Image (spheres, rainbow, N blue to C red):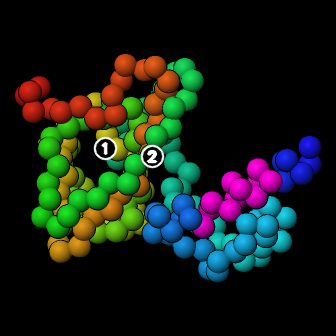
Amino acid sequence: MKTLIRRKATLFLGLVPLLLGIAGLHTESALAADDYALGLAKDRISVKALLPMMPSKTIIGQDYPYPNGTPLIESYLIELPPGQKTGIHLHQVPLLAYIISGRLETNYGSRGSKVSTAGDVFVEAIEWCHFGQTIGTEPVRILAIYLNSVGSPQKKSVDCAGLQ
């Protein structure tokens, strides 16, 4: 039993450097999977909180609850080339966004605009139409993590064009 648990831990923790690399994040040194599983590398791992402890508010100050039911967490890497503008849309479920690279201006209509840059983390507006566009010559890369529930009729994103 201990061997099985150790193998699963080694497999899971061995994926950490790969996942961080995909997101554009890096630890100070490459670590072997066994080092993670055995806890021998803890003095070589850098951990940084990306989102400070704060009330459950979106980027425009809305309260939001966690979805009911069995959790369904979906993550996406969103890439916008320079000069790209998204369509006007809204999110029906909480979306945690981490800006990996670039500069993004998001227009929230009567709630104003926000500029997000590499390293920014926020919970996107919920049920509020908005659009984003890149600023400058660098592509924008976003790690988007949607907090939904299994079988929920709520969609991650909904086109607002026909709602206005």
Q: Position of residue 61 (x, y in %)?
A: 35, 41
How many tags in the picture?
A: 2
Q: Residue furthest right?
A: 2
The kind of residue on which mark 2 rests is Ser
| Dot 2 and dot 1 residues touching (CB under 8 Å) | no
Disc 1 crowd rating (10 Å Cα; few below 14, some 14-19, many 20+) is some
- The residue lying at 14 percent from left, 44 percent from top is 87
Say above or below: 1 vs 101. above
Residue 62 versus residue 154 in the image, above or below: below
Q: Which residue is mark 2?
A: 75
Residue shown at 73%/66% (left/top)? Answer: 33
Q: Is residue 12 on the magenta stretch?
A: yes
Picture quadrant of residue 6: bottom right
Location of residue 150 in the rendering, given as x and y in whole percent from the top left corner: 50, 24
Q: Which residues are magenta?
A: 7-17
Task: Write the residue at 8% across / 27% down.
Answer: 162
Quarter of the image for the C terminus: give it.
top left
Task: Give the vertical position of 142 relative to 152 (above or below).
Answer: below
Q: Taking the image as drawn, is residue 66 in sight?
A: no
Residue denoted by label 1: 60
Q: Is residue 36 on the magenta stretch?
A: no
Question: Element under label 2?
Answer: strand
106 vs 25, nearest the viewer: 25
